[in-house]
Image: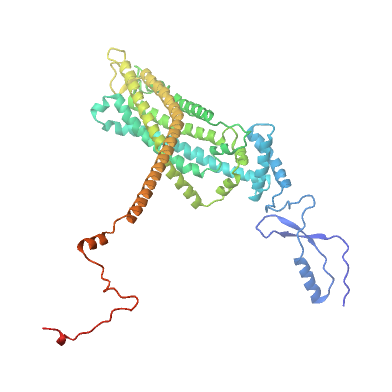
Amino acid sequence: MPAITAQSSPPRITSLRPETEGASTSEIVPAQRSPQFSGPEGLRARNRSAVETSPLRTPDSQAPLLSTRPTPSSPLSDHVVASQLQGVVMASLGVRELSPDVEARLVENAGVLREKGFDTPEKVQGLLKTAWRHDSILAVGALGLTGSAGYAIGMELASEKLVAKLPGHILRNPPALGMLVGLGVGAIDVAISVMGQATVKPLIYNGAEGNALLPPSIEVPRGAEAIMDSIKQATSANFLKNLPRIPTPGLQAFAERHLHGVQDGSILRRTADRIDVGLDAGLGVAASAAVQFKNLTGATGYDARMLLRSDLGEVIDKMQGSYKDSVVNVARSVGSALMQPAVPLAVVATVGVFISELFAANAMIDSAGHAEAGSHGALPPDRADWSVMTGKRASSVALMALMTATIEFGAPIVAAGADRLSGAAKDVAKAAAGKVSDAAMSAIAFVGESANSLPDIGAWVTQRLGLHSGEASRPNIEIGPTPHHSVRIEELPT
């Protein structure tokens, strides 16, 4: 039998074996010298030795650096990943040093990331980019469009089609006309905006609601401060988007003077209204998108909020969820929005009041500027002086900014009041149900007690009629039943 050579030298690295789990990298595999058998036995021994070899891990790390498979979570590896992500968090927060609770949360979430398979900074960066791309499209694009599309549609319908079909007595009453137009525009605007919010917000991964899930040391607006920030942000956006509407009548007069030779400074009313509505709609979409972008980034930045929120594991599960889960979440959000009509109705009423005031103010400015005794009184009905139209645009800008501030200030108050009323109504209904249940139980107990104390009516009837319970008709228990006698028909007496 051939002699077996001893193996005293260290193993040689002779092959790269590709991973079997679909990874693009390879693992270094050491080659073990098989016993030197000759013939078929030697071939089988060498094949068996090649199959039984195990992968060699790099000596300077506990994890295979060339593998994309997640490694088991350990405190050391979590701290390593967290230290690699500190630069991202500090850049997003705009600070040079992290507080202890932020560092602890980052280490904790590093373990969550490793468990989900994101165990390198490159994979985490890919996760952040994917989430940002998805959320920015939905928030800035979808919510930005639905947040202002309803107002633009309502104003377009009001200025071109619906107003002309109203009765004459309403057209001659600017406040009433403004109230009808405002209620219609507000209803369309609120319906599209509320449904847009209810449909899109459940699909966003890392929205502004994540600010409430950050470590306590991170200062984000809360309570009254958050309401004031919302008022400032919405009011300033509304004012800035309406501000370019003021100089448009003057620019239109300049264009008509040089293109059509109009020398009296008048402009066509219909053209001015169409320009104003189009500018209002376009700038409204831009302003709404800017507000949504600001809400998405927030005071902490998108990346820091994503990496430091306490429900990071749920967010990743949501990103990896199915379309069915998204449909269920959207359906629940829409149902919840339909069950809370207090704020939308209050917003519609507010829009109606302010549009009514706007129509009244514009009618007063128009009548005063085009009075018969004035310098512009001779203008035809389809033309207006550009300075008068500029005054109307300025009043619109001021009233719309005030309306936005009123809505932003009043909406949280109305929502809180509706919640309290709903809670009080539920408590009253619960108390009433308890009282009804107690009354029913008392009635059942009374009926049971009364049934036990009822007189024996049968015995009383028997006693009054002189009847007795026939003892002879009852079988005698001691001697048995009464014998039965049969009689033939011919024996009966005639």
Front-most of 216 and 488?
488
Q: Position of residue 193 (x, y in %)?
A: 43, 37
* 300 over 203 or under it: above or below: above
Number of numbered callouts drawn: 0
- Residue 262 shown left or right of residue 100 in the figure: left
* 54 over 359 or under it: above or below: below
Front-most of 95 and 224?
224
Q: Tell me where residue 2 sits by quadrant.
A: bottom right
Q: Position of residue 91 (x, y in %)?
A: 65, 34
Residue 249 in view of the camera = no
Q: Tell me where residue 432 sits by quadrant.
A: top left
- Residue 317 shown left or right of residue 143 in the figure: right
Front-most of 112 and 460?
460
Q: Position of residue 299 (x, y in %)?
A: 58, 32
Q: Where's the C terminus, which quadrant?
A: bottom left
Please give the name of the residue rendered at 13% of the width and 83% of the height, measured from the top-left corner. 493
- Residue 397 shown left or right of residue 64 in the figure: left
Q: Tell me where residue 469 sits by quadrant.
A: bottom left
* 421 over 59 or under it: above or below: above
Q: Position of residue 413 (x, y in %)?
A: 45, 31
Q: How is the image coloured?
A: rainbow
